Image (cartoon, grey):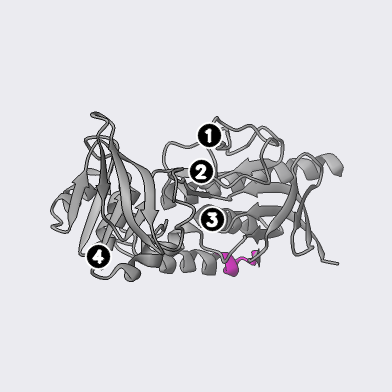
Amino acid sequence: MGNVYDFDAVILGGGPAGLSAGIYMARSNAKTAIIDISMLGGQPSNYLELENYPGFPIIGGYDLMEKFEEHADKFGVEKFPMQEIKSVDLLSNPKVIETIEGDTFKAKTVIIACGAQPKKLGVNGEEEFVGRGVSYCAVCDGAFYQDKTVAVVGGGNAAVEEGMYLTKFAKKVYLIHRRDELRADKIVQDRAFANEKMEFVWNSVVKEVQGADTVNNLVIENVKTGEISDLSVDGVFPYIGFSPNITDINGQVEQDPNGFIITDETMKTSVDGVYAIGDVRKTPLRQVITAAADGAIGAVYAGKYIEALEKVTV
């Protein structure tokens, strides 16, 4: 039998959005908990370095998230890492979250900060070779490809930056993009084009991942000509976008066709007392700074919701 906890606010997710929300909630004297399926820090903890977070011209992703967490600790945010969610009831009052570990969390308001995960290519061989040549984290696995050849799939900042990171280890990095120009920021593109280890495969998509014990080949299709070709590689890193982590929340709040949660400008969802922040919501930009800003806004208005609720019950 697990524990039963009562909080003013429970935040689902401990990345930059969730930690920022935790700081703001706790500063408003709300009893606040952050639940995360892993250790706190979220995706940025896996980034080698960031150079666009104000105040830090360059800083390791893990180092920045450690500062976020220390800040949350200062205000007494209670943290529950390594808690896998079993069920979430956002429609009840109080809201109820149950974990696989048997704990039950009750809260007046819930802030969803579950983030997003990399989209899969959805081709034959991808799932089969995860961990054996297919990876979604260059920082985690790049060192395994010393003097080898790898491919990165995508054309945005994440794909190009991770591709450049991989050149620290690999002798050759192919960047495969379905269009004939990148979507990444100009400064990022310029660096990539100047990197002698990078080669660009334009107007192309991966149709299949092949290998024996590990990946050794990609089947590539040119989207303009329809030509099929083989690309010999030792690994592939897809960076083609993200899908929201909303398995336990699906259907309880309004979502867009891709599953991202729809909010208003205060981060309020379609359910009273429920807010969504960061990468999990429909937003035009997914960056650490925008996630942190979402957390501040969502927490302030969640605090106002709690105040209004307490006035009604007095």
- According to the picture, the residue beneath numbered tag 4 turns out to be 170
Q: Residue at label 3?
A: 20
Dot 1 corresponds to which residue? 258
Q: CA distance from mark 1 to mark 3?
A: 25 Å
Residue 239: tell me if it is visible: no
Front disc: 1 or 3? 1
Q: Residue at x 61, y 44 (%)?
A: 246
Q: Disc 2 vs disc 1: Cβ atoms closer than 8 Å?
A: yes
What residue sits 52% from the left and 57% below the top?
A: 15
Disc 3 residue type? Ser
* Amino acid type indicated by mark 1: Asn
- Give the Cα distance between marks 3 and 2: 22 Å
Q: Residue furthest front?
A: 212
Q: Residue at x 23, y 50 (%)?
A: 188
- Tell me the CA gap for discs 3 and 4: 36 Å
Q: Which mark is residue 243?
A: 2
Residue 306: x %, y % from top left: 73, 45
Q: Nearer the viewer, mark 3 or mark 4?
A: 4
State the SS at label 4: loop
Residue 73: within the magenta?
Answer: yes
Q: Nearer the viewer, mark 3 or mark 2?
A: 2
The kind of residue tagged 2 is Ser
- Horizontally, residue 164 falls left or right of residue 69, namely left
